[in-house]
Amino acid sequence: MSELSIKEKDRLYIANTYNRFPVEIVRGKGSLLYDDTGKEYIDMGAGIAVSTFGAADPEWIEAVTSQAGKFQHTSNLYYSSPCVLLAEELIKRTGMKKVFFSNSGAEANECAIKTARRYSELKYGTDAKRYKIITMDKGFHGRTLATLAATGQEAFHQSFLPVTDGFVYAKTDDLDDVVRLVDEGGCCAIMIETICGEGGVLPLSPEFIRGVAELAEKRDLLLIIDEVQTGNGRTGKLYSYMNFDIKPDIVSTAKGLAGGLPLGATLLGEKVGDVLTAGTHGSTFGGNPICCAAAMSVLSRITDDLLAEVKAKGEYIKTVLTASEDVVSVTGMGLMIGIEFKRPTPEVVAECRERGLLVLTAKNKVRLLPALNIPWGLLERAVEILKEAGQE
Ligand SMILES: *Cc1c(COP(=O)(O)O)cnc(C)c1O
């Protein structure tokens, strides 16, 4: 019997939680990826907004290997510089007060949820039962039981009940509905994505975002912004909330932060900077030195010039595709774009792949999350292929 292929072994040995595209990636360079047959693809997904500067980026490799050659892990029992320098950089650039490091978006959100509950309990007491968190019914916050509960889309809860108690869902982008839930009482926080990513690249309106921020301030509810997908330059600002002139109490991020290594960060503002104390939270891998060195390198390259490029590239994609008669709508900001074609999304995605272009989906849309430094030439080719693949 001949040796099984990687695709066959994958189906045999790996839990069936992923519907994989029929492509085996063997290497990459920037925004180009190559499969096991040598076929070249333009990568418009960057590993779901993770590979901020593409595949095998030389500066990123240098940051990672240079730290790996010093020490790869110390535990959080000792002082070490990579996580401290990264925290300092994040704080300088956001005005937040403290950072808790973890390994993923779900964990960054878990920390946000724990912090919000503890803030409220320390201030108002256990008897106040002030622990509910309001989230959006089209939001997505992760796969652990608490972040699944925070995820308002009921479909994700099915067959995992009971999920963690203490979350209530407002109609997405509906301020009156948020006010209704606040008036019911027992809430400690409101948690939103500025653009619901998994929910279909749905941007919340600036009026709603500012309205929620004002309401939170007035009622002493913590404003938590989930920047797991929208963060780290994706929307043309370092964090997407910076587009709206608001000041969140807690910001969670992960995906693109370390450019391809697992790192989550929960940024804590003035009100909650000292809520977590020794023993109240922790993570063995959190703040891993190699991941933090990678993130330092990523942040050092998210400059005003790069952010202006991200905006310009996003505008370019929007302008070209909005003009196409095969396109129903284009949503998103910067290099986080959702496109609804008249042609069914799975057909568009498959045809793109045939033509050497890898794109993502979100609900009924094609989703683009390319590397922030994707060269203009590749971007123009990608948009051209997408336009052609979108034709009915
Ligand atoms: C991806 C995502 C998460 C979950 O991140 P993981 O690293 O997969 O745990 C949470 N929130 C948002 C907005 C995301 O896009």
Image (spheres, grey):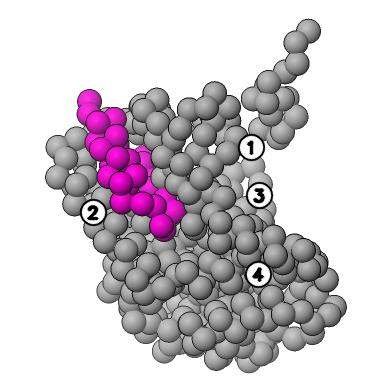
**CA gap, disc 4 and disc 3:** 36 Å
For label 4, the SS is helix
Segment colored magenta: 364-392
Q: Which residue is mark 1?
A: 17
Q: Earlier in the sequence, mark 1 or mark 3?
A: 1
**CA gap, disc 1 and disc 4:** 29 Å
Splitting the image into 4 quarters, where does residue 86 fall? Answer: bottom right
- x, y (%) of residue 138? 43, 55
Report whether the residue tagged 1 is closer than 8 Å to ligand 1: no
Residue in view at x 62 percent, y 53 percent = 143
Q: From the image, which quarter does the C terminus lie in?
A: top left
Query: Which class describes the residues within 10 Å of circle 3: few (<14), some (14-19), or many (20+)?
Result: few
> Which label was assigned to residue 161?
3
Q: Is residue 372 magenta?
A: yes
Q: Are marks 2 and 4 in contact (CB under 8 Å)?
A: no
Q: Earlier in the sequence, mark 1 or mark 2?
A: 1
Q: Earlier in the sequence, mark 4 or mark 3?
A: 3
Query: Which class describes the residues within 10 Å of circle 1: few (<14), some (14-19), or many (20+)?
Result: few
Q: Which mark lies nearer to you, 4 or 3?
A: 4
Splitting the image into 4 quarters, where does residue 117 fall? Answer: bottom right
For label 2, the SS is helix
Amino acid type at image mark 4:
Cys
Q: Are marks 1 and 3 in contact (CB under 8 Å)?
A: no
For label 1, the SS is loop
- The residue closer to the viewer here, 50 or 243, is 50
Q: Is residue 200 visible?
A: no
Q: Earlier in the sequence, mark 1 or mark 4?
A: 1
